[in-house]
Each structure stands twice: as structure tokens, then as C-alpha cells.
């Protein structure tokens, strides 16, 4: 099943069901008005959503209309909780070697709690105060959970993964380095994330959903240049393990979003990167200094996860960075 949220005058948007090929959609009226409400009552409404989805794919819904990603908000335009992991060891190992960051990997995942009250759509221009902050994109995969009880095991956690999403976790690298050195977490370095327009149930991926990991390549373009196509299969911790880690001492509310961290592979020479920081890290290790700059005003980033047949099940993130020059105190 594929779901999205139409932009409207309400902060949570309006839930729609999207066809498998992303060509058409229908309102979820009478079932759930928003995705947050659907997640809160998933056991009650998911069968009705699935039934309408199947009818939509058969062309049997008279009220169907063309799906336009530009009219979609983020699937969850705001969420009660956003927890971002760093589950790709290739990314963390690079940070340790290139930037002399302390190696904090062990038996537990890395995770922080970020801002969740706003997720940008796939096509919104994204405003930043200044280029001097080191504007960077980060291609990630993510999940949306229903209610998760405290103390759950990874095996039990897997059943609470209801939807999969694709995320651009924007970062301000210069500010981020300062906040990490101060040792009290990210705030100024982490503006609102963006999401691809469509959230999907795990069954839509078939064998590409395995071991609680998304086995798709995440293609990234910076301006007109192909920047990388790393696979989500190399997560050192699956999303089931990330859920169990997050729920160690707290319940997770319905609509909790958990991110994978930057998608990264050990074969970076062949697959490239999902963020600029990695490209700069490779340059430091191999050429002695970073040569690639961060994003400038008007730069464009596109992200699209692809199946083996070239389909893009989440749709495409396609955004420009806009520098406003307005720096708050």
C-alpha cells in the first residue's frame, strides 16, 4: 500500500491513497483524514485502506485523480517523535578516520532525538541563513511505527514497522561540529528534514525488504551530477534493532519516525556518497585535504530510491537550497 498527504489548510495535510505506479490517487475519506490518525488506529483502518488501494490499482475508483508530487506534503508533515540513527558503519568509520571523531561504536546503535514538529515536502525550497554554515544533504531511509511498548525485543519490534519512508536529513556541518564539541546535542545544526512524497508498507518492496532493512539503492544528484547510489542493505543495525534501542526505557507513540542515518557503503569508490561530508572525508584521506565545498544558494539536490526494475516506490525528493541572509541571534 502507498499513502501520501495532500497539502491543505490543515497542518497534518489530508490523507490520500496512491496507486502502485504513482500515477493516480484517491482520498482516504471515511477511513482516516490524516496519516497520523491512520497510524493511531492502524489495526482498525488498514484493511479498509488496503481495499481501496487494490481497487485504485484496478482502475475501479471513480473518484480517483492524477497524483502530483508537487501537491503533496511530507507523508507526516509533523510527528510526535523523530529519532535518527547512524546505522551505517561505513559512514561512522569514515568520520573517525577523516575527522578524528571519537569512535563511539559498540554493541548499541547511535541515535539522537531531533526536531519533529515539521517535515518539509519533496519539492519545497529550503531556506538557510548563510552558506558559511556548511549546508549539506543526507540521504536516508526511515520507518513509521504504531504504538511500541517499553522494553520490546528486536524480534517483537519488527511487527511495529508499519510504513517505510525516504528522507533528506538536512545538516549544517560547521555548526554541527561546534555543537558536537560542546557535547550537548544538535539543535542549530539540524533544520527540518524533508521526505519523499509517498510512504509505503513493507510488503510493497517484496524481497527488497529483508532483515528489517531496505535493500534499494538511493540515487542522489547534486545539481546535474550523479553523486551516489549507495544501498540500504549495509545497515549494521536493522530498523527492528533501532526500535528496540529507542524503546529501552520509553514507549514509542504511534507516528514515531526512526531514520537509518546517512546511507553509506564500504565500496564508496564504486557507489559514491549520500552526503557531501563523506565526499570531503574521502578527499581528506586520499588527497590530504577536502576539495569539495558545501551547497550554495540555488543548488539543487534530488534523491530517488530505485528498485531493480528502475521504479521509484517513494517518489522523488527534488529541492533547492535558498540562502536568506537572515541570521538570528
Image (spheres, helix red, strand yellow):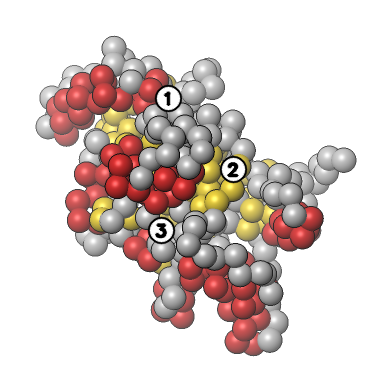
Q: Residues within 10 Å of mark 1 (few under 14, many from 20)?
A: many
Label 2 sits on residue: 113
State the CA–CA distance, disc 3 to disc 1. 26 Å
Question: Where residue 71 appears, x then y in whole percent?
Answer: 44, 31
State the CA–CA distance, disc 3 to disc 2. 17 Å
- Taking the image as shown, residue 316 lies to the left or right of residue 54, namely right
Label 1 sits on residue: 36
The residue positioned farthest toward the top in the image shown = 30
- Give the number of the mark in front: 1 or 2: 2
Name the residue rendered at 29%, 47% in the picture.
155
- Taking the image as shown, residue 200 lies to the left or right of residue 119, namely left
The answer to which of marks 3 and 2 sits earlier in the sequence is 2
Q: Is residue 216 above or below residue 194?
A: below
Label 3 sits on residue: 237
Element type at mark 2? strand
Question: Label 1 near label 3: C-beta < 8 Å?
Answer: no
**Quadrant housing the C terminus:** top right
Element type at mark 1? helix
Can residue 46 be seen here? The reply is: yes
Question: Where residue 221 appears, x then y in whole percent?
Answer: 49, 62
| Closer to us: 126 or 233 | 233
How many labels were placed on the picture? 3
State the CA–CA distance, disc 1 to disc 2. 19 Å
Question: Where residue 110 appears, x then y in whole percent?
Answer: 54, 56
- Give the number of the mark in front: 3 or 1: 3
Name the residue rendered at 34%, 63% in the picture.
233
Question: Label 2 near label 3: C-beta < 8 Å?
Answer: no
- Taking the image as shown, residue 92 lies to the left or right of residue 220, namely right
**Quadrant housing the N terminus:** top left
Amino acid at each position: 500500500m502507498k499513502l501520501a498527504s495532500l497539502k491543505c489548510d490543515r497542518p497534518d495535510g489530508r490523507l490520500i491513497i496512491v496507486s502502485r505506479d504513482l500515477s493516480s490517487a484517491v482520498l482516504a475519506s471515511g477511513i482516516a483524514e490524516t496519516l497520523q490518525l491512520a497510524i493511531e488506529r492502524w489495526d482498525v483502518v488498514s484493511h479498509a485502506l488496503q481495499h481501496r488501494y487494490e481497487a485504485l490499482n484496478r482502475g475501479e475508483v471513480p473518484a480517483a485523480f492524477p497524483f502530483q508530487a508537487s501537491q503533496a506534503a511530507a507523508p507526516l508533515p509533523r510527528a510526535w517523535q523523530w529519532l535518527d540513527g547512524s546505522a551505517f558503519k561505513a559512514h561512522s568509520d569514515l568520520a573517525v578516520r577523516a575527522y578524528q571523531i571519537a569512535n563511539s561504536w559498540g554493541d548499541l546503535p547511535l541515535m539522537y532525538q531531533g526536531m519533529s514538529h515539521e517535515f518539509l515536502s519533496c519539492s519545497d525550497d529550503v531556506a538557510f541563513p548563510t552558506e558559511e554554515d556548511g549546508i549539506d544533504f543526507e540521504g536516508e531511509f526511515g520507518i513509521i511505527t504504531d504504538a511500541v511498548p517499553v522494553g520490546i525485543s528486536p524480534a517483537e519490534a519488527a511487527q511495529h514497522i508499519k510504513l517505510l519512508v525516504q528522507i533528506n536529513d538536512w545538516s549544517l556541518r560547521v555548526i554541527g561540529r561546534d555543537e558536537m564539541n560542546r557535547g550537548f546535542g544538535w539543535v542549530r545544526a539540524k533544520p527540518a528534514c524533508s521526505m519523499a512524497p509517498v510512504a509505503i508498507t513493507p510488503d510493497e518492496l517484496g524481497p527488497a525488504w529483508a532483515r528489517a532493512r531496505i535493500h534499494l539503492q538511493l540515487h542522489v544528484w547534486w545539481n546535474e551530477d550523479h553523486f551516489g547510489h549507495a544501498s540500504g542493505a549495509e545497515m549494521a543495525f536493522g530498523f527492528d534493532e533501532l526500535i528496540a534501542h529507542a524503546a529501552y526505557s520509553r514507549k514509542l507513540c504511534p507516528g514515531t519516525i526512526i531514520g537509518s542515518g546517512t546511507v553509506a557503503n564500504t565500496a564508496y569508490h564504486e557507489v559514491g556518497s549520500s552526503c557531501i561530508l563523506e565526499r570531503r572525508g574521502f578527499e581528506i584521506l586520499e588527497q590530504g585535504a577536502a576539495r569539495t565545498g558545501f551547497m550554495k544558494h540555488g543548488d539543487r539536490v534530488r534523491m530517488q530510491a530505485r528498485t531493480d526494475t528502475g521504479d521509484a516506490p517513494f517518489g522523488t525528493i527534488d529541492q533547492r537550497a535558498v540562502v536568506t541572509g537572515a541570521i538570528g541571534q
